[in-house]
Image: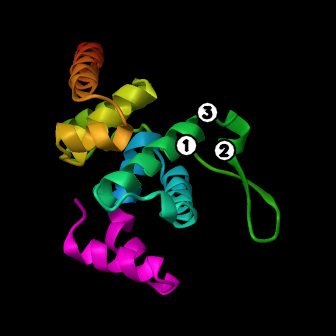
Amino acid sequence: MPCSDDIELINRFRHGDKSVFEDIIVRYQDRIFNVCMHMLGNTEDAQDAAQETFLKAYRNFVDFKPNASFYTWLYRIAINTCIDHKRKPIWESIFRRNDKDEEIVIEAPSNIYCPEKAYQSKQIITALHIALKKLSPKLRAVIVLREIEGLSYEDISAALDISIGTVKSRISRAREELKTMLIDFMEQK
């Protein structure tokens, strides 16, 4: 169920006050960006996906059912946008154009470990990010929503339009795959 502030904004939007969508963006932009960042692994792609999420939400606002959580509905759009983004050919992901229509190359996030005093914890965080990228989009989506965003099984089920049993199964598989990858990584060090 949407929170009362969401309901007020939704009603104002539906009654023609399109300017309230900016309030919706401000309220959810950090959370949506974080989901996109965890799904895609680099800032530029995450920013693009987050922006596209809000554009899709704006265009499809009539599809939102007020009996559902607005937050969950936005997450579903974000996850699907990230999955679609991953399906793009690689050249669409790494080549962009600047304001002068000049081609620029987007650098992939660095996997170099910080040699400072937090070396080991940064190494583990980097290994976790690498392992997350290796998960299938379906497994990555459930683990990000559960472990990073803290959503309940019910909210994940609603966001991804899958059964709670499927959510639990995917979370279990994702944890097992992550565990195996992290053990392999630590044994290589």
Dot 2 crowding, Cα within 10 Å, few <14, some 14–19, many 20+? some
SS at badge 3: helix
Asked if residue 18 is among those painted magenta in the image, a careful observer would answer yes
Place residue 93 in its image quadrant. Answer: top right
SS at badge 1: loop
Dot 1 crowding, Cα within 10 Å, few <14, some 14–19, many 20+? few
Ranked by sequence position, the earlier of labels 3 and 1 is 3
Q: Amino acid at mark 2?
A: Ile
Q: CA distance from mark 2 to mark 1?
A: 8 Å
Vertical relation: 25 (above or below) 153: below
CB atoms of marks 2 and 1 within 8 Å = yes
Vertical relation: 145 (above or below) 16: above
For disc 1, the marked residue is 108
Q: CA distance from mark 3 to mark 2?
A: 13 Å
Residue in the picture at 58% in, 39% down: 84
Residue in the picture at 56% in, 36% down: 86
Q: Position of residue 102 (x, y in %)?
A: 82, 61
Q: CA distance from mark 3 to mark 1?
A: 17 Å
Viewer-side residue, 20 vs 104 = 20
The answer to whether residue 119 is visible is no
For disc 3, the marked residue is 87
Ranked by sequence position, the earlier of labels 3 and 2 is 3
Vertical relation: 63 (above or below) 117: below
Magenta region, residue range: 1-30
Place residue 163 in its image quadrant. Answer: top left
SS at badge 2: helix
Picture quarter with the C terminus: top left
For disc 2, the marked residue is 94
The answer to whether residue 135 is visible is yes
Mark in front: 3 vs 2: 3
